[in-house]
Image (spheres, grey):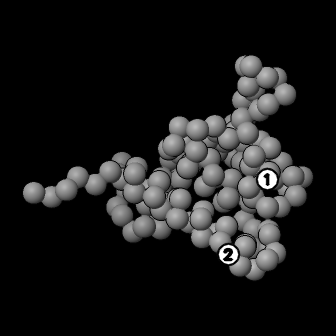
Amino acid sequence: MDAFADPELESLKLAVAIYSLRRKRDVASARRGLFGEPGWDILLDLYIADRRRTEVQVSSVCLDAGVPSTTILRWIARLEQEGLIYRIADNADARRRYVRLTEDGHEMMRNVLRAISGTALVT
């Protein structure tokens, strides 16, 4: 009997591995942000957070990417304009804002991760 493979779990594992390797590369080079792809980093971070059912604050995105906050904020605005992410205020603390993938953002990340892993796209 064939084992059931969960494509969402496999995509999550791949996203975590890619994100981890990117962080290791930055540490090994001793130059954070030198190899930066802020848009990709943001989308990976949000995909992982969504699959783990956690929230990502705008300020956290800025810290994790290892590039200046102004760069990250420009990328967040661009990804928002592209319809891939959205920001939402915290109901308990109006100063805090979260960033999440839109449905289009989810779909794009699933497709990209499946393409990277070589698995067939499920429609």
Between residues 47 and 116, which one lies in front from this camera angle?
Answer: 47
Q: Which quarter of the rendered picture does the N terminus lie within?
A: bottom left
Q: Secondary structure at mark 1?
A: helix
**Residue picked out by circle 1:** 63
Among the 4 quarters of the image, the one containing residue 83: top right
Can residue 74 be spotted in the picture? no
**Residue picked out by circle 2:** 25
The x and y percentages for residue 114 are 43, 60
Among the 4 quarters of the image, the one containing residue 36: bottom right
The residue that appears at 79% across and 31% down in the rendered structure is 96
The reply, left or right, for residue 21 in relation to residue 68 is left
Badge number at residue 100: none
Q: Secondary structure at mark 2?
A: helix
7 to 88, vertically: above or below? below
Distance from label 2 to label 1 (Cα)?
A: 16 Å
10 Å neighbourhood of mark 2: few (<14), some, or many (≥20)?
some
Between residues 107 and 88, which one lies in front from this camera angle?
Answer: 88
Q: Which residue type carries mark 2?
A: Arg
Q: Which residue type carries mark 1?
A: Leu
The x and y percentages for residue 77 are 79, 45
Can residue 9 be spotted in the picture? yes
10 Å neighbourhood of mark 1: few (<14), some, or many (≥20)?
few
